[in-house]
Image (spheres, rainbow, N blue to C red):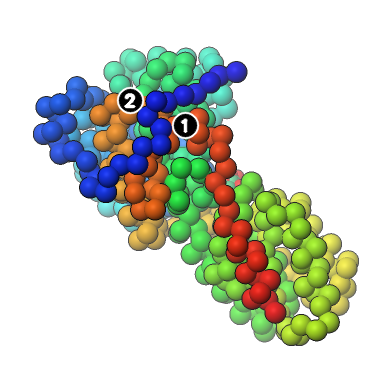
Amino acid sequence: MLSLSSKKSNKILNKNEPRFGGAFLCLYFKTMKKVAIFTSGGDAPGMNACIRALVRTGIYHNVKVMGIMNGYDGMINGQIVELDSAQVGNIIQRGGTILKSSRSEEFRTYEGRKKAFEVLKKNEIEGIVCIGGNGTYTGAGIFYEEFGIPSIGVPGTIDNDLYGTDQTIGYDTALNTAMEAIDKIRDTADSHNRVFLVEVMGRDSGFIGLAVGIAGGAESILIPEDHKDLERLYSLFSKKDGRQKAFSIIVVAEGEEGGVLKVASQLKERFPQLDIRSTILGHIQRGGSPSARDRILATRLGVSALERLIEGGKNECVGLINNNIHFTSFKEAISKRKPLPKYILGMTDKLSV
Ligand code: F6P
């Protein structure tokens, strides 16, 4: 069993980021000359804005920033390109990731990680910044323990399920995408007096489900963290004294109760009179131009991550807590669960009367 540790966890930085100018860094720190950045796991809108911020912050501090293509797979296979300021121009508004992404099986093995280390050594890369979710952080933490390559993580996932930051890059855009889709579904649900079950992403976590349920005016929200929600849904349709609604929107988190189709068939069995339809929003939630909020978050985290790395940070991830930059060790970020805003569940009960 590998243990991950960091002596620098949990430091709240002051609000005056970026903390040091380039001149200061050069004078007082032996700064790195060459670092590499990559995106890994599910892509998220705003990753490109973060790549832009990392590259340009590197250039500002006279550090060469290399891009690793295709996540950990590209690190293993030596897919490394040099990034300059022009290459990251005109990408702040683009969804996806210009560096591509993967969920690497090979990096889960020691042999794969050793190959990756040899590639970094050959390319004289002194530190890495990874943008991704839980799996990405886990990989970076183990890699640091085994090979000592300093790494800083940046939270990039639409799921928002990362400890150590109030919000992850891509979450806000995904929420808006899902909300707009629900608004459209609402039109047709209303015209046909139907019950619509809408499945949103987040197989292990209900952040998207909860927030979009509120923003989209859902009658009920089914998420992995709340196992009473199916009963709550049934009681909604059994109510004799409640307002008779012509149509309903129910938000179901991916994978919850076996997915939206299973929930729909169970509901139909119980209430055969209902005219039920199901929609799976799926990967449209991962695409599209990032919202202003995601671009700003991605930029802020990118600048802070690069500066932390070149001033000696390692084995930790950057986040924003109460609008302050905050660093958390990978170990803590991986092992702790960010609490859901559960008060929202109580709110839907009140709002669906
Ligand atoms: O990136 C997070 C996420 O979109 C989850 O919400 C979803 O469960 C998963 O990725 C889907 O992954 P994939 O695109 O590999 O099927």
User: What amino acid type is highlighted by mark number 1?
Assistant: Phe
**Comparing labels 2 and 1, the label whose residue is closer to the camera:** 1
Q: Pick the quarter of the image with the N terminus.
A: top right
Task: Kindly tell me whether residue 109 is visible in this rendering.
Answer: yes
Res. 230 image quadrant: bottom right
- List the residue tagged with mark 2: 127
Residue 182 percent location from the top left of the image: 59, 70
Q: CA distance from mark 2 to mark 1?
A: 15 Å
- List the residue tagged with mark 1: 330
Work out whether 56 lies above or below 249.
above
**How dense is the environment of label 2, judged by Cα within 10 Å: few (below 14), some, or many (20 and up)?**
many
Instruction: Give the residue drawn at x 39%, y 53%.
Output: 322
Task: Kindly tell me whether residue 46 is visible in this rendering.
Answer: no
Residue 272 percent location from the top left of the image: 88, 73
Res. 295 image quadrant: bottom left
Residue 168 numbered mark, or none: none
Work out whether 147 lies above or below 216.
above
Instruction: Give the residue drawn at x 19%, y 22%.
Output: 30
Q: Pick the quarter of the image with the C terminus.
A: bottom right
Mark 2: is the Cβ under 8 angstroms from ligand 1?
no
User: What amino acid type is highlighted by mark number 2?
Assistant: Gly
Relative horizontal placement of residue 162, taking residue 308 as reference (left or right): right
Relative horizontal placement of residue 308, taking residue 320 as reference (left or right): left
Instruction: Give the residue drawn at x 53%, y 21%.
Output: 3
Nearest to N terminus: mark 2 or mark 1: 2
Instruction: Give the residue drawn at x 73%, y 74%.
Output: 195
**Helix or strand or loop: what does disc 2 sit on?**
strand
Residue 262 percent location from the top left of the image: 79, 57
Between 333 and 185, the residue placed more toward the observer is 333
**How dense is the environment of label 1, judged by Cα within 10 Å: few (below 14), some, or many (20 and up)?**
many
Relative horizontal placement of residue 29, taking residue 259 as reference (left or right): left
